[in-house]
Amino acid sequence: MSIAEALASTIGADRVARDADALNARRYDQWAVKHLRDWRGEDVPAPGCVVRPQSALDVQKVVKLAAEKRVPLIPFGLGSGVCGGIEPTPDAILLDMSSMNRVRYIDEGDLLAGFDAGLNGMEAEEAVAAHGLTIGHWPQSIAISSVGGWVATRASGQFSTAYGNIEDIIHSIEAVLPNGELVTLGKAVRAAAGPDLRHLLMGAEGTMGVITGVTFSLREKAPHRDYSIFYADDMRAGFEVQRRIVRADWRPPVMRQYDGREVRRLFRDHERDGKAMLLMVHEGPKARVEAELAAMHEICGAAGLEAGDPMAAKQWIEKRNHVPSWRDMFQRGYVADTVEISGRWSEIGAIYDASIAALNEIPGVINASAHSSHVYRSGINLYFSFAATFEDSAKMEPAYFAGWRAIMEATAKNGGGVAHHHGAGRLRKPYLHHDLGDSGVALLRRVKQALDPEGIMNPGNLIPDA
Amino acid sequence: MSIAEALASTIGADRVARDADALNARRYDQWAVKHLRDWRGEDVPAPGCVVRPQSALDVQKVVKLAAEKRVPLIPFGLGSGVCGGIEPTPDAILLDMSSMNRVRYIDEGDLLAGFDAGLNGMEAEEAVAAHGLTIGHWPQSIAISSVGGWVATRASGQFSTAYGNIEDIIHSIEAVLPNGELVTLGKAVRAAAGPDLRHLLMGAEGTMGVITGVTFSLREKAPHRDYSIFYADDMRAGFEVQRRIVRADWRPPVMRQYDGREVRRLFRDHERDGKAMLLMVHEGPKARVEAELAAMHEICGAAGLEAGDPMAAKQWIEKRNHVPSWRDMFQRGYVADTVEISGRWSEIGAIYDASIAALNEIPGVINASAHSSHVYRSGINLYFSFAATFEDSAKMEPAYFAGWRAIMEATAKNGGGVAHHHGAGRLRKPYLHHDLGDSGVALLRRVKQALDPEGIMNPGNLIPDA
């Protein structure tokens, strides 16, 4: 009996797809490289079969079968990943979580909502919004990503500076471990009951198990919102002001700082002499928002920043969830990507300069720019964009990987962290040792070996080989 | 060669103590049970030797030797633990971290400070306070606990509702793993670079390795502080108001709610008809503190709470770090302890009622009371106190464990989490399955087995036996 037949007899033939259309549709997620290869007519492998579980019990059955037969199992949410987190092969089962898409419950009193892992993020948000609540997690991908994917990749949302990243929003995680056991981790609102095991699954990108359900701790929709815009002479001047704002214990939910190139590209009507632009959204009780806004003008003004037109921030709010089409770009002769990293305040200026310089040295690169979008007490992220153009499309893939290498190495060399919020996948795997050190990578391998001794869970992803 | 001789030749004879005074002084931490047994003249075992490393390299040498000889190794910070996290035996090495007590660095720009793990918490706080900064972590034990102990036990401070618990304050952890490897986890200000491995050590209470250094992300000392006091008819009415405050996105750093018994015992001058008292400390930029205070009066007033004298909160600030002496209590005929748990808003009232009722059913119990002290969007903690009195001191220990059992079971039965911030130790080990489930406990065991296959690290602590 083939593995597909065994799966069909275990969870139902209608849950197992082997037709070419179904398999081809699951050859990639949003990782640019796979789209580039496909667009160029190169071979992009498909999985051997696609399984669509309807319940955690279904997932347990599939995992147990995969473990028994030692067949690779690749969890797939809604396919918004951009770092090579999945790489189907004909010997693998792709576990398509999109049929597990129920809202399990919304508890308005306890501000908790439970969802199946495969539920679309915007649908989850809309479900709680109907109760005047919000998850408070707004990744750019919200309309095309799953709530389980947010957790599996340790995602960040656009309002993270006040509302936190996914690890601050998650309450509990339900998951099937590689041995087929179902765990629910995170019973308490906060616990000192041994290591917080939720963190074994958060960010594991399918290598430690399959997330089947998530519970988030919600917020009331903010009663009041306001916007502010300030211009800084350059990125370093802007970073310094953001540092002062957070140091003074202000936490505007959205703090974004675009370099001059991005202001020109994204905010043409609001360009000002090539300066960097700091865009903020302020939310909460009206009196606090007013106090915050006054403080922003005071802090920014004292640092010599010029106030701008808050309309630019409203414009951003409206367009913020746009996700580009890779194939349109290839067609127009471009290969491009975005790369997010982080750095402490003292090093972020050097990371910015070194990364932009390194990108610009790559033949074919016609744009290298960045903005920041997530702020912490001790530092900030940067979100680089780069684009290269070639007449010969065969040159695109090498330039793509050269762009990534440039940013990863410039970041690591200057002390930064190589992965802020898109996850690691196969793309960052060669650079992970910069963050973890060799002994940290060895520790990660040891944990993987303990949880998944057969190595069936998303093999090849994330964890550097020994 | 004995293990002590081997240790002496490895890290220096002056770092290895075997004299009776040194061994006897390390028979216990602050766990009431060991003090009770000692006070009653029962045998309380001492470790076989006490080792005082001066560096992470020393710790590596000790761990490697212990692993090679398969000798139990018990990390010991400054001994403020209250849950049976250490239980020395004559065959064990006690690793006394108190000589690793340096401030490694304070970076005012990046708001980071690195400390040796054995440094006293108050000394760490005073070191950063000299720069106008604060760690923002104020456990009641701050004057007698170590910064590494805060991390090893997943501690909370009194200002946690705004400033977070230790997991929100930690930047990086340096630790020696059971195989002797040194890891530094937490390079980035935030990362999506695989599972956050810091969480394997946070809360592990010495079972997964030895924390040798910690780096915290600091805050600027708040420029303004104010206080408020409100009275609620009962605990449930107070919980409901705290729920509304946090739901409206206010986060006073300190929110404490005492039941009528504790108001009478701790705030005699501020007692009001047996009502519960909500005590808050507000900190931050002046305009925000004023807005927050106004909102508190509005929210509390709308719920029918009466405002009280803020002097009660100032009084708490002054006395808050008092730690009781168990032996004084035994001498006066009492056995007592405090037990912290957590619950969602919908269940915390039932947990309070059921725990108090169960405590009062235990023969000899003369006080059962509680206050809350840490608030989250979806729930809150409770910190129970109980005391029992007996003429025959042999009855004290059974009553002590009966009190714990009463609260653990009442909490779990009503859906709460059995451990908020003191850690688990041997005291909560029998109840850990309530939080983690059987499959979660099995997962914890699997991780322990992977990191510490010889089982040398603090054996018997935390992790329920298979």
Image: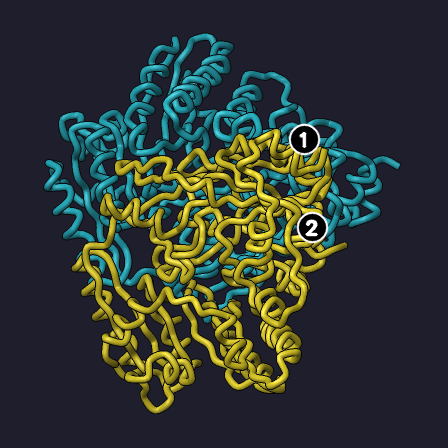
Chain colours: A yellow, B cyan
On what subunit does the disc labeled 1 rest? B
Q: Is residue A68 left or right of residue B340?
A: right
A369, B431: nearer the viewer: A369
Question: Does residue B215 sit above or below B425 in this rendering?
Answer: below
Q: Is residue A334 visible?
A: yes
Give the secondary structure at mark 2.
loop
Question: In this view, which residue lies farthest toward the bottom?
Answer: A273
Q: Is residue B47 above or below residue A35?
A: above
Q: Which residue is mark 1?
A: B459
Q: Residues within 10 Å of mark 1 (few under 14, many from 20)?
A: some
Say whether residue B118 is visible: no
Using residue B367 as the reference point, say whether residue A85 is left or right of it: right
Q: What x and y, as percent, mark residue A418?
A: 58, 66
Residue A224 at x, y = what percent?
19, 59
Separation of disc 2 and disc 1 at Cα? 46 Å
Q: Which amino acid type is shown beneath numbered disc 2?
A: Pro
Per the rendering, the mark at residue A66 is none
When asked about the image quadrant of residue B247, the answer is top left
Tell me what residue is drawn at x 19 percent, y 55 percent: A223
At a point 69% along the width and 43% down the height, the residue shown is A456
- Amino acid type, label 1: Pro
Please identify the quarter of the rendering in which residue A159 is found.
Answer: bottom left
Q: Is residue A203 left or right of residue B95?
A: left
Left or right side of A131 for A167: right
* Rendering coords of residue A440 (x, y %): 67, 54
Which chain does the numbered disc 2 sit on? A
The disc placed on residue A90 is 2
B315 and B58: which is toward the camera: B58
Quadrant that contains the N terminus of chain B = top right
